[in-house]
Image (tube, grey):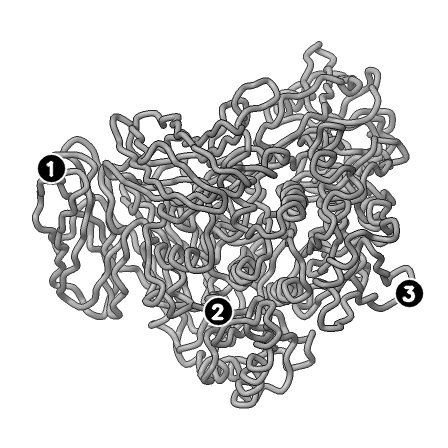
Amino acid sequence: MGRILLVITLVASSVFALPVAVSGKAASSALYIVQLEGDPAGRQESARGAIRAGRADVLRRAGIRRTVTVYESAFNGFAAALTPEQKARVERTPGVRHVWPNERRTVDTVSTTGFLGLDGPAGAWAKHFGDPSRAGEGMIIGVIDTGFWPESPSLAPLPEPRPDQAVIDKKWAKGGTDKCDEGTGTAQQRITCNNKVIGARFYDGGGFGGWESEFHSPRDYDGHGTHTATTAAGLPDVPATINGDPVGTISGMAPAARIAVYKALWRQSDGEGSGGTVDLLDAVDDAVSDGVDVINYSVSGSESLIVDPVELAFYNAAAAGVFVATSAGNSGPDESTVAHNAPWVTTVAASNHDRGADKSVTLGNGKTYTGAGQGPAVPSAPLVDSVKAGLKTADAEKVELCYPGTLDPALVKGKIVLCKRGVNPRTDKSIAVRDAGGVGMVLYNPSENSLNADYHVIPTVHVDHVAGAAIKAYLATPNPTASLSAVSAVVPRAPAMAAFSSAGPALAGGGDLIKPDITAPGVDIVAGVSPAGHHGNLFDGESGTSMSSPHIAGIAALIRAEHPGWSPSAVQSALMTTAGVHDNTDGMIQRAGKIASPLDYGSGHVRPSQAFDPGLVYESGPQDWARYGCAIGQLQLVSDWCPTVGTADPSDLNYPSIAVASLPGTQTVARTVTNVSTQPSVYVASVTTPQGLAVTVTPSTLTVAPGESATFKVTIRRTDAAYRVWTFGSLTWTDLRGHTVRSPIGARPVALTGPGEVAGSGAAGTAAIELTAGYSGNVTTKLFGLTPSAVHQQNLAGSTAAFVPTAPATGPAVFKFTVTVPPGAEFGRLATFAADHVPGTDVDLYLYQDGQLVDRSDGTTADEEIPLTSMGVFEVYVVRFAAPPDADSRPVVAHTFLVGGDPAGNLTVTPPVAAVQPGRPVTFTAAWHDLDPAKRYLGMVEFGDGAAARAWTTIAVGPDALPPAPAPSVSPSVSPSVSRPARPSPSASGSRPVRPSPSASVSGPVRPPSAVVPSLRVAPR
């Protein structure tokens, strides 16, 4: 079977179907990605002719004369500016599979080489390559980011002649395409390539490159792209200076590897690096065609989808043999914030390394608070809060954040200033203090976050939210003073998880695949940057999963250089099964002072030396990934392949980690390992048993010849583990040749598992609810609802792509209403339905409390949903994002469902009580009657074990029948539209979907697929 083409819309925190100023069409046009039927070419040049002919036929039939770009290597389709009429015509054209709007994505880093065991006489570079200058020869790393700074010392030309030149030419020179686009403008704005950066392209079909200071070339203004490129493959032993001070020498992970730059992200006027999916997809497509071996993608992504244009271009990239490293996201420490959750990419968390940067502030009352920082000591000086030191004409919020030009020199000169973290770059805050005459800065976190030893222009201590509050209180006393210490030389405990690093369990797949996969250094990483965006510096320290991902990309290039025949999944497995879970004190890796878990670090912290010889690997390929995508209810949204490839339990994917998100008693999973060493070995299994479980491995001994495979089964059984709480252990295979092959085991026992939601229609009807128990006894039932929705509707004019979530306002295409969730409400929901609107309408929902955005649902149709999970008063903005010509003929309609604590008398469930045995399914029948067939209703069945509630299934009844929700492990669907992915319900794994709580925030355990928190770059804010 050929490779399977998988594509769906890329979801984001913001959707930018940009006006077509970029393409010269009418203002009503917007950019879209059009997926065509059929596989992409990958690296099969013979397939391109048929793809191009098919694309030309679709364009002719649809009457589209101009495209922004075309895709054919990792994705089969094109991007074009389309009016609503053109979009509708394209969607009806034979050969078109799907159409999505262009959407926004944002970017997500001296001693890491020593910390990772790469350098030195006994390091991996010397052992496997002889010398750092040869580490990574023959490899090409594609970096999709903000560009590169050609004059960076870390990207200088490699010595000639190159011993790997023939290998590089075989990959890179085919096709005769010019892969180094110097761009436009002056010589200082354009770029040149060399034998280190062998190619550079830039993409602005999405219209994000309009900021006046940006370079219309692959040249990097932001610095993020240069940082990731030099972290992955910068030259070895490059002296680095920051603000004129030497900070040591730095090296990339694969110093001899070549770099291909794909600039698809652009510096914005607000300081962020952003780009459109139209361009990011184009960059992936080119990278695969160009012949890269590894892609680094330090860019935000979906938390709930594995089927969007970029992720599925990565599917085809991996199928073509490209290893893809992605950043896990910077939305930690909250759970279920990890992004890039597909099994065909390696998702990288961030942790610290062993470069000490402790620095403290001592107050005049004698109390000392330790944080992080750089720079010399500052003797005792007056201390002032920035909120008390602003210019009278300056904006108060900017004063508190220490924006340059907002502080009053008369109030700051000679003082240490307390500044609040957030919004503007952290290093800009110290510039503001310096420019106003300050002698030092104390930067505080307003809430839990990382501490960063940035290189500020004046001595600075960065403290946490607890110390910040204490210092604020001290400032209320008369004549406050403070002093700053020098930097401590004490080696910190490392690795430890960064506070910002996004955590699992992954929403996509419901937790049956542990993500992130691995952790790597991502805190205060010194690497090359762009002086344009870094105050003239060629080097700087940055933090984020953006910085950890290129560590893995570079190390993967090293492994591929040693083992060019290994598949991407074999490299991934080698990295994961050799990762470590202990720090430099021999204790377990920690997060915020407590023992971390695989939901934080995946398989552990990368150990490159061990990954070159893992012994056994867990391999998977396109068909395995497709079955997994079908099993979690996502691939069928964008493809008709599921009947062909079938499904398997998501926990059975042949992955280097083992996870069972809903364990009703006992479950057995299977794995297959392959011996990638040159000698036969006998491996013996040992298990670190998760607390409250029993784990059996069959067989417990494997004899595996070189190149051969062996299969085993792991049975996980609950003994006395708490319900709905993850518990972790590990399985390790060892032989007598020094191989240790470790896989984390994670399971979440549940008393009952079943569908999160079932649905139907009409005045009367029934729906089946099948449950599986993890205990012997009875299952009891309790009913809530059915309750009709409150309808909110308004006639709107046209549509708008200009709604700003951070500054909401009504307008011709936007209306708002207020909803109050009262005490006693069991659960609630906001929703819009495509059936209420003219076909082709796209409606978005935004939920606010006290002026703050707390949730959103902004997919590509009029089927949207937001759970209401806490009591209070909320404002809801309803935005018609796109509309066909006749949309104004019907009002825009939104629904509020508030289900109280008592049954409404219109819902029954039979039997009311049922006996159950572990692992045996039992079926209940929900029946409704006497409903108004023109209305929509919502209710819930609560299932218990006689002592406590254990699971909940919502009942949705409306005039249009919704498809029944699948089982919990396959992400129950609550939407009738195939353009919306199945949305996992928290009740599917036995946790309450929406229990009002005064302390809860309004963000459901599972966000709508389009309401993705972007993996924003942590540094330098």
Of label 3 and label 1, which has the lower sequence position? 3
Q: Is residue 941 left or right of residue 1016?
A: left
Q: Position of residue 648 (x, y in %)?
A: 33, 54
Q: Is residue 793 visible?
A: no
Front one among 863 and 317: 317
Q: Is residue 214 visible?
A: yes
Q: Can you identify the residue that label 2 sits on?
A: 880
Residue located beneath label 3 in the image: 186
Of 913 and 968, the residue lying toward us: 968
Of mark 1 and mark 2, the one earlier in the sequence is 1
| Residue type beneath disc 1 | Asn
Task: Say whether residue 860 is left or right of residue 642.
Answer: right
Category of crowding for the residue at label 1, using alpha-carbon neighbours closer than 10 angstroms: few (below 14), some (14–19), many (at least 20): some
Give the Cα distance between marks 3 and 1: 77 Å
- Which one is nearer the viewer's eye here, 395 or 978? 978
The location of residue 708, given as percent across then percent down, is 45, 46
Residue 408 picture quarter: top right
* In this view, 72 is above or below 86: above
Tag 1 residue: 778
Mark 2 residue element: strand
Give yes or no for contact between labels 3 and 2 (Cβ–Cβ under 8 Å): no
